């Protein structure tokens, strides 16, 4: 297959690029740096200027769109919130308009999204892809982000919105940031620990993406989460067991709000119980279904 990827240097993009290259696929990296080499495997784009060099995208089988401003890189002042929104909506619109103009567009566009669409809910409420949109900032961003793929849909391209949960990896993301305090024995739950963490192993994502490419009947939102969501308290306890460290020091919610401002609640304090209904009903079998075995596979051998 010929697969093009935006956001290819991020945590998920790097994993997908490696996986598909190892599979023997032709991977094109869509990047912001021009490369004049005629044998290049990169495609130049500049969404701020509305530019996408489309020649190499002709006849591409799959486009995986992951690019967007990191939502946790800095506090959410008004300028940062605008960057978070426009980096997703503008980039997606520019890309999808370019795809719609191709003579041979990709068969499928797999576009990143997030379970932040559903907002904060108690553990008793289980959410699948039919869950309604929340009314907070992150949910509004995600809604507009998904809507920006409309030009691709109108061009007849199958569009899948990959609503990612918390991606677990020692290479980056939430788990990597948690490892130091937990290894030092000062880790613990966040707030009251009751918020649900709907997670997915990084190594699972390429397998799911491969499945979504093959399952031509799947369209629209797909929750990219494991079937084993856990409370933050259970997550902390499980991580402590895998690392052989105590988990007795909770991190107060009010302190997180002081340190991180508005983004503390949607990213750290809140949660939602999300299930991968579409994947399960389509017959996908998870390689990393349970938290303890997943953390052990990610970290266990390194902690002995």
Image (cartoon, rainbow, N blue to C red):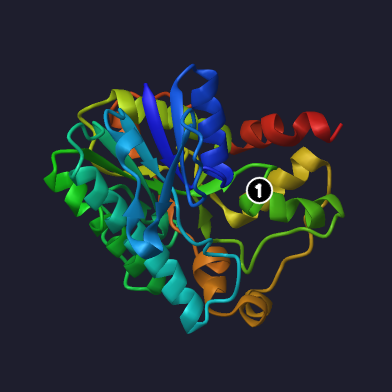
Q: Residue at x 68, y 73 (%)?
A: 252
Considering depth in this image, is 27 or 42 the residue closer to the camera? Answer: 42
Q: Residue at x 34, y 55 (%)?
A: 51
Q: Is residue 44 visible?
A: yes
- Return the residue found at the far top: 24
Quadrant of the image occupied by residue 232? bottom right
Question: Is residue 262 positioned above or below 10 on the image?
Answer: below
The x and y percentages for residue 142 are 35, 61
Instruction: Indicate the quadrant containing the C terminus: top left, top right, bottom left or bottom right.
Output: top right
Q: Is residue 288 visible?
A: no
The x and y percentages for residue 78 are 47, 83
Considering depth in this image, is 66 or 253 the residue closer to the camera? Answer: 66
Question: Is residue 302 positioned above or below 223 on the image?
Answer: above
Tag 1's secondary structure? loop
Instruction: Indicate the quadrant containing the N terminus: top left, top right, bottom left or bottom right.
Output: top left
Considering depth in this image, is 67 or 34 the residue closer to the camera? Answer: 34
Task: Classify residue 234 as left or right of residue 272.
Answer: right
Task: Classify residue 66 as left or right of residue 109.
Answer: right
Q: How many marks?
A: 1
Q: Residue at x 70, y 49 (%)?
A: 176
Q: Residues within 10 Å of mark 1 (few under 14, many from 20)?
A: some
Residue under label 1: 172
The x and y percentages for residue 136 are 37, 73
The x and y percentages for residue 219 are 23, 38
Q: Residue at x 27, y 25 (%)?
A: 215
Considering depth in this image, is 75 or 225 the residue closer to the camera? Answer: 75
Question: Is residue 241 positioned above or below 181 on the image?
Answer: above
């Amino acid at each position: 297959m010929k697969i093009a990827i935006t956001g290819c240097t991020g945590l998920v993009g790097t994993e997908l690029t490696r996986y598909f290259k190892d599979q023997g696929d032709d991977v094109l990296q869509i990047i912001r740096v021009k490369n004049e080499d005629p044998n290049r495997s990169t495609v130049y784009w500049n969404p701020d200027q509305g530019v996408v060099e489309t020649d190499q995208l002709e006849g591409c089988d799959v486009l995986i769109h992951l690019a967007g401003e990191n939502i946790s890189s800095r506090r959410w002042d008004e300028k940062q919130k605008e960057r978070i929104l426009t980096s997703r909506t503008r980039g997606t619109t520019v890309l999808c308009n370019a795809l719609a103009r191709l003579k041979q567009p990709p068969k499928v566009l797999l576009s990143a999204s997030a379970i932040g669409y559903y907002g904060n809910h108690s553990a008793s409420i289980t959410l699948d892809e039919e869950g309604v949109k929340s009314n907070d900032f992150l949910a509004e961003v995600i809604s507009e982000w998904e809507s920006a793929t409309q030009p691709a849909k109108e061009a007849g391209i199958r569009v899948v919105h990959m609503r990612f949960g918390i991606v677990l990896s020692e290479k980056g993301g939430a788990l990597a940031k948690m490892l130091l305090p937990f290894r030092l024995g000062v880790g613990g739950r966040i707030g009251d620990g009751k918020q649900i963490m709907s997670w997915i192993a990084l190594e699972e994502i390429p397998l799911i993406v491969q499945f979504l490419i093959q399952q031509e009947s799947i369209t629209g939102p797909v929750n990219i989460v494991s079937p084993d969501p856990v409370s933050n308290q259970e997550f902390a306890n499980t991580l402590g067991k895998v690392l052989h460290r105590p988990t007795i020091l909770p991190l107060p919610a009010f302190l997180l709000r002081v340190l991180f401002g508005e983004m503390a609640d949607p990213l750290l304090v809140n949660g939602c119980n999300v299930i991968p209904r579409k994947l399960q009903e389509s017959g996908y079998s998870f390689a990393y279904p349970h938290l303890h075995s997943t953390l052990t596979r990610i970290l266990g051998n390194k902690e002995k």
